[in-house]
Amino acid sequence: MFKRINLWKAGAFVGSASALAGTAFAEGPTLGVYIWGDNQHGLIDTNDGNLSIRTPTRVPFLDGQRLRDLSLSSMVAAAVLKNGSVVQWTHPEKHDVVLKGKSVKKVKVTNDTILALSSGGDVWSWTKDEKKPLKFKVNDGLGWFEKIVDVDAGEDHVACLTSKGRVLTGMLRQPDEHNGQLGQASFSAFDPPPRPFELRLVKLIPEQVVQTACGASTTLFRTVSGDVYGCGSNAYGQLMLPYTFKNTKVSVPTKSTTRLNGGLGPVTNIAAGGEVTYLQTADKCLVVGNGITGQFGTGSLAHCQAEPLQMPLLTGLEEYNEKLGKVETASPTLWSVSPTHTFVKLSGGSGSWFVWGNNLKGELGTGKTAKLIKPTLVGQLENITANSVGDTFVAGNSVSACFTKCT
Ligand SMILES: *[C@@H]1O[C@H](CO)[C@@H](O)[C@H](O)[C@H]1NC(C)=O
Ligand SMILES: *[C@@H]1O[C@H](CO)[C@@H](O)[C@H](O)[C@H]1NC(C)=O
Ligand SMILES: *[C@@H]1O[C@H](CO)[C@@H](O)[C@H](O)[C@H]1NC(C)=O
Ligand SMILES: *[C@@H]1O[C@H](CO)[C@@H](O)[C@H](O)[C@H]1NC(C)=O
């Protein structure tokens, strides 16, 4: 069912749109999982040979299901079922339950690799073809009652946040080179990376970390006081460090030296994917990195941006809350960032989402292939609203999904 929502910015009416409310009309699209975008590996539709599917397409075996989580690339998708087991599929008609009885709460797919975090704090990983979950080994001792509570991954690495505000990093595979994205001085960008599936503590951040975010080959850390540290590739300015030869690969977590901390106030949220990094402060949204995909959302396609750019379209939004009968501020709260495009959910009762970025494979769900260089309300995209139902959107590399979360 679609709910009508109205959005204002600085008192001016921005537009109204249908927000996906997560329940289905009998005759409309039904509760389940929908995917669209890159179909070169046959993930979405194997019948008509289309290399890109621009219309949300149902995943039949998940009809009627709510999920704990979902993540995908153009090669493989993985979902956490209501019972905490992980199912993966590479084809709409075949699927495998790969991890059972571990009470998984989060999955993250990167290229051909799937990562899962259990409620107990174990991190598992496997490739789409092997389907044999391996548990990451924690090489540094954690404290009493300290466990991993969140995980994110780049192309080749993972970052795990613990309940004590510390971060463990490790490799997912063994590439020839790395960029220092593990933030461990003993494995600098000039040394070979450590063996995969081993996690080590990141030292040298003098404060508690409350959030981490991974780009393709970067790791960002937000501390309790609102500072941001980063390591890995700064080739496009994605660590907010001045663009110098020395800063191309940063092996030690380094505090952002931009205007950010002085001029913009403490950072309250971070997100990253591919070569872009987003930051939020109490009243602003900012972006750095490579904007060639349109993911800056400012209209700029600059390919190297180290100084945070403000995203005016995501600032100062207000929504009418029907339940409370009043207008309330709506700021971005939940980000899903891939190397190609970005979804973000607004706080507030309507549950509306924005989408923007690259669209070469139809991943934006507009039914066309033109980029969106400005954040656009998903509820205004007819092809998505007419063909899918869900309350959560997920960006993968050239693909998108929508599903309904378990309550
Ligand atoms: C398949 O491709 C054709 C053009 O090649 C297009 O008209 C059609 O809409 C595509 N189907 C889907 C489901 O995207
Ligand atoms: C969860 O559901 C899946 C799919 O029905 C099933 O294969 C799996 O065994 C279940 N897991 C547990 C722990 O019951
Ligand atoms: C993704 O996986 C494929 C095959 O599994 C591999 O050929 C390719 O190099 C990988 N790409 C990246 C960016 O890791
Ligand atoms: C949107 O989806 C419908 C299927 O419901 C499809 O037939 C139509 O071509 C799509 N619109 C565009 C603009 O491609």
Image (spheres, helix red, strand yellow):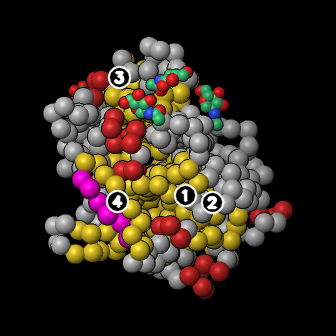
Kindly identify the residue that appears in the image at 25 percent across and 63 percent down.
349
Q: Disc 2 versus disc 1: distance between alpha carbons?
A: 6 Å
Q: Disc 3 versus disc 4: distance between alpha carbons?
A: 41 Å
Residue 188, how many percent across, how many down?
Answer: 72, 55
Residue identifier under label 3 = 96
Looking at the rendering, the stretch of residues picked out in magenta corresponds to 3-8
Residue identifier under label 1 = 374
- Quick one: 260 or 19, which is closer to the camera? 19
Foreground: disc 4 or disc 2 = 4
Mark 2 or mark 1: whose residue is earlier in sequence: 2
Question: Is 193 rendered above or below residue 7?
Answer: above
Residue identifier under label 2 = 299
Q: Amino acid at mark 3?
A: Asp
Kindly identify the residue that appears in the image at 40 percent across and 38 percent down.
383
Residue identifier under label 4 = 16
Mark 4 or mark 2: whose residue is earlier in sequence: 4
Q: Amino acid at mark 2?
A: Gly
Quadrant in the picture for residue 107: top left
How packed mark 1 is, by other alpha carbons closer than 10 Å (few <14, some 14-19, many 20 or more), is many
- Are the residues tagged 3 and 2 within 8 Å (C-beta)? no
Q: Amino acid at mark 1?
A: Lys
Mark 4 or mark 1: whose residue is earlier in sequence: 4
Is residue 4 magenta-colored? yes
- Quick one: 68 or 225, which is closer to the camera? 68
- Are the residues tagged 2 and 1 within 8 Å (C-beta)? yes
Residue 174, how many percent across, how many down?
Answer: 65, 37
